[in-house]
């Protein structure tokens, strides 16, 4: 019995000490391949957003934390495949997919058990660029609906 309790205690400590998010690991693994990569706190990112966009993106900006961006010069197939495996393997759900000829935008999110969206990831693919933007959030479905209304986008 003591052995089982000790193993359980070790597992709980390991889980509680998990300091990197799922996307942080992906970011760390691929930032060396990127032409440009940056991680910025939400407060700093908000300083550079024009006031018109701040009004439109209200809930997202108020409830966002760290932003991370990876920019690849070319549509890097290996990173794209790795990203696809990453979102499938880490329980991200696709929120939106927009396509126009060879250009594509995908927005993924990850919820916690309380149905709070903890992370939004945007993948933008064009013929000559591949960009991934991730944002830590604390959004609710109501916040997404407000955001969709502000942007004049139907979420249903």
Image: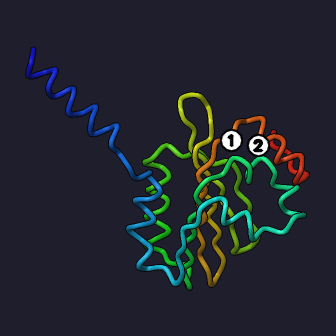
Residue 44: which numbered mark, if any?
Answer: none
Q: Splitting the image into 4 quarters, where does residue 32 fall?
A: bottom left
Q: Quadrant of the C terminus?
A: top right
Residue 121 or 103: which is nearer the viewer?
121
Relative to 151, 4 lies left or right: left
Closest to the camera, between mark 2 and mark 1, is: 1
Query: Residue under circle 2?
Result: 144
Dot 2 crowding, Cα within 10 Å, few <14, some 14–19, many 20+: some
Q: Secondary structure at mark 1?
A: strand
Relative to 101, 39 lies left or right: left
Q: Residue at x 87, y 54 (%)?
A: 151
Q: Residue at x 21, y 28 (%)?
A: 9
- Residue 117 position in % (x across, y down): 62, 41
Q: Give the residue at the far top of this rendering.
A: 1
Q: Are marks 2 and 1 in contact (CB under 8 Å)?
A: yes
Q: Secondary structure at mark 2?
A: helix
Q: How is the image coloured?
A: rainbow
Spatial CA span between label 2 and label 1: 7 Å
Query: Residue under circle 1?
Result: 139
């Amino acid at each position: 019995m003591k052995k089982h309790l000790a193993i359980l205690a070790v597992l709980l400590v390991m889980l509680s000490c998990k300091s990197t998010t799922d996307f942080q690991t992906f970011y760390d693994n691929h930032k060396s391949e990127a032409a440009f990569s940056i991680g910025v706190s939400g407060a700093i990112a908000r300083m550079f957003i024009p006031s018109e966009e701040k009004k439109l993106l209200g809930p997202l900006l108020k409830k966002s934390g760290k932003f991370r961006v990876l920019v690849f010069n070319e549509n890097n197939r290996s990173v794209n495949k790795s990203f696809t495996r990453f979102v499938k393997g880490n329980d991200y759900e696709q929120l939106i997919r927009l396509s126009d000829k060879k250009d594509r935008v995908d927005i993924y999110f990850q919820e916690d058990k309380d149905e709070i969206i903890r992370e939004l990831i945007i993948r933008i693919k064009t013929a000559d660029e591949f960009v991934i933007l991730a944002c830590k959030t604390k959004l609710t479905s109501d916040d997404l609906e407000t955001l969709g209304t502000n942007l004049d986008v139907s979420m249903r």
